[in-house]
């Protein structure tokens, strides 16, 4: 029986007097890969920020591997990719950006050496950005930058990885590559991954569990169950047509895109 | 070897030390998009200068206190209410300048002194100033070499720096305090109005050509030394106001760097 990695118990969060999360409870076991879906403004980012302890819940309790968020973060257990990084112009090289992401309390005083460089290169390999390692970060395209930021969140190999819409701007092929990578990482290294995404159809093939969030938690469990039309209609407030995509199929995206026209 | 008069020796010492200090911090100013921080802090210091004149005491200490208050307030407004630093800078800049002008209006007859703080006056530099500048420079180099990684991650994204367990608040306020000290100490050399060039130009020039943070820091320091040394030399040879000459040099260096082909 794997230990609980992230436990969210009856969390209520109010921002500017408005309830954004209402009595949300979630138990993520060690080594599980979770997808969080829900409409814009549904509170997904708020949930992640509450888990890392940036937002204090009005009611309820969060723990990470049995520790308070603050303590877990201090011990370098958490890797986090925010939705809004606001770093498009950060003037260093790609490799530097990834290495900097590996900084923690434990290596704070140690200058970067060849080992950090290797680790950064390996992280860049995962997102297929090795060739651009020495390019200036601002010169990358939006999707390339996003891949580098994903590498940055993973470089320290944290046990708990929280990713807020990591695939924003990343092309479809790379997206699936990335989901594959995350799945592989959690299988090989036992990472626990919590990922916010809007990619409802695709994600169900990669994750172990899905949580559907719109202020309250509408569903948490097997990914198949989340594709139920009535649930999605309830979640998004109108009928949603999900095209379930099979990982082996490379042409589905095109079909899906064509269907819209 | 030319035998410089004492005030000139002080000026050379201050110019070199301030180049080392301001160009090091310049990098963080530029990566944080704090171009106007120097303006805000130096003008806040001017309020302190005016208070010193009114009370009939040396303006150095009140200027320092005003600068520190300004730096910390700018940081606090950002961290507590989420405004970009520029907002608080804009408010504090004119607020403190207003206070300064009102205070000066009570203490008639000091306008020429006000002038030397606004545009710098190397004749006002003392040995004590030089020691203070040297001390803060040492402190800044210690701080940056020990905390460089954390400072970079914080500049990249504060929330990520927090999730790596870094003391973001400490790093952030320390950086602001060092900047406040550096700017207020540079006022006698280049003046309230001109100091900002020395905070912004060195790293901006270095960033045009390099991407590794170590080489950027080194080039930035080199550019700063060139601006201060060159500016002071030209001022000495042509008998021009030193602060203004340095500011002009900084501007010229920046524009020349723009037309140099882009090897980055
Ligand atoms: N700092 C804040 N102050 C006040 N309200 C906020 C703040 N941050 C978020 N909110 C509000 O909380 C609600 C949830 O926001 P959140 O960012 O968690 O949504 P989300 O599910 O991540 O949406 P998206 O899919 O668009 O990223 C929104 O209505 C938003 O307006
Ligand atoms: Mg969000």
Image (tube, rainbow, N blue to C red):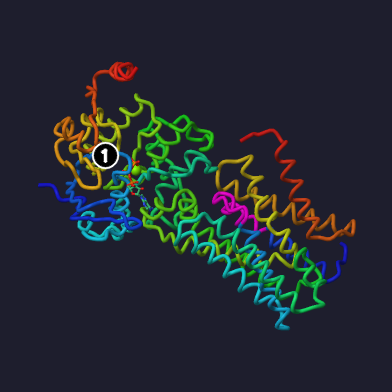
B3 left or right, relative to A38: right
Q: Residue furthest left?
A: A1
Q: Residue furthest front?
A: A238
Whether residue B32 is in magenta: the answer is yes
Pointer 1: residues within 10 angstroms few (<14), some, or many (20+)?
many
What residue sits right under mark 1 in the picture?
A38
Residue A151, above or below B31: above
Residue B177 in the image, given as x and y percentages of width and height: 56, 66
Which quarter of the picture shows residue A35? top left
Residue B162, above or below A35: below
Which quarter of the picture shows residue B59? bottom right
The chain letter for the residue carrying disc 1 is A
Whether residue B170 is in magenta: the answer is no
Q: Which residues are magenta?
A: B20-36
Task: Identify the main secondary structure in magenta.
Answer: helix
Residue A117 in the image, given as x and y percentages of width and height: 44, 42
B163 left or right, relative to B177: left
Q: Nearer the viewer, residue B123 or B142?
A: B123
The tally of labels here is 1
Determine if the C-beta at disc 1 is less than 8 A from ligand 1.
yes
Q: Nearer the viewer, residue A198 or A166?
A: A198
Q: Residue furthest right?
A: B238
> Label 1's element?
loop
The quarter of the rendered structure image containing the C terminus of chain B is top right
The quarter of the rendered structure image containing the N terminus of chain B is bottom right
A103 left or right, relative to B14: left
Residue positioned 76% across, 79% down in the render: B107
Residue A8 in the image, given as x and y percentages of width and height: 20, 53
Residue B28 in the image, given as x and y percentages of width and height: 56, 53
Residue A172, above or below A155: above
């Amino acid at each position: 029986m794997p230990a609980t990695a992230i436990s969210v118990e009856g969390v209520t969060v109010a921002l500017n007097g408005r309830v954004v999360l209402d009595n949300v409870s979630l138990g993520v076991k060690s080594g599980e890969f979770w997808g969080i879906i829900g409409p814009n403004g549904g509170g997904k980012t708020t949930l992640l920020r509450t888990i890392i302890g940036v937002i204090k819940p009005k009611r309820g309790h969060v723990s990470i591997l049995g520790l308070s968020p603050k303590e877990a973060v201090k011990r370098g257990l958490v890797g986090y990719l925010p939705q809004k990084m606001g770093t498009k112009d950060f003037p260093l090289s790609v490799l530097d950006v990834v290495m900097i992401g590996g900084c923690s309390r434990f290596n704070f005083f140690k200058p970067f050496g060849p080992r950090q460089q290797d680790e950064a290169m390996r992280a860049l390999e995962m997102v297929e950005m090795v060739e651009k390692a020495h390019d200036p970060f601002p010169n990358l395209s939006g999707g390339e930058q996003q891949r580098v930021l994903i590498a940055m969140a993973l470089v320290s190999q944290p046990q708990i990885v929280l990713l807020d819409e990591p695939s924003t701007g990343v092309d479809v092929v790379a997206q699936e590559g990335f989901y594959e990578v995350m799945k592989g990482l959690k299988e090989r290294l036992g990472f626990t991954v919590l990922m916010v995404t809007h990619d409802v159809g695709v994600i169900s093939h990669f994750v172990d569990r899905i949580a559907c969030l719109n202020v309250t938690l509408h569903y948490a469990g097997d990914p198949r169950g989340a594709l139920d039309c009535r649930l999605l209609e309830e979640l998004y407030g109108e009928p949603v047509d999900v095209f379930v995509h099979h990982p082996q199929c490379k042409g589905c995206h095109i079909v899906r895109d064509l269907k819209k026209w | 070897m030319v035998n410089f008069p004492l005030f000139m020796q002080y000026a050379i010492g201050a110019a070199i030390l301030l180049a080392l200090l301001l160009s090091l911090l310049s990098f963080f100013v530029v990566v944080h998009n704090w171009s106007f921080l120097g303006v805000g802090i130096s003008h806040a210091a001017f309020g302190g200068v005016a208070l010193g004149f009114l009370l009939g005491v040396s303006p150095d200490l009140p200027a320092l206190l005003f600068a520190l208050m300004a730096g910390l307030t700018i940081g606090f407004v950002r961290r507590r209410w989420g405004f970009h630093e520029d907002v608080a800078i804009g408010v504090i800049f004119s607020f403190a300048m207003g206070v300064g002008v009102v205070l000066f209006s009570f203490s008639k007859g000091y306008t020429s002194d006000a002038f030397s703080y606004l545009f710098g006056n190397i004749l006002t530099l003392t040995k004590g100033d030089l020691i203070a500048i040297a001390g803060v420079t040492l402190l800044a180099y210690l701080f940056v070499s020990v905390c460089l990684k954390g400072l970079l991650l914080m500049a990249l994204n504060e929330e990520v720096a927090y999730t790596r367990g870094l003391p973001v608040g400490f790093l952030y306020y320390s950086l602001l305090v060092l900047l406040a000290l550096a700017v207020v100490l540079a006022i006698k050399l280049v003046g309230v109005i001109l100091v900002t060039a020395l905070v912004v130009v060195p790293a901006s020039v270095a960033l045009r050509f390099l991407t590794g943070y170590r080489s950027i820091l080194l080039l930035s320091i080199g550019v700063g030394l060139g601006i201060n040394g060159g500016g002071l030399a030209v001022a000495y040879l042509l008998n021009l106001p030193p602060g203004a000459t340095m500011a002009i040099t900084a501007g010229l260096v920046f524009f020349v760097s723009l037309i140099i082909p882009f090897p980055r």
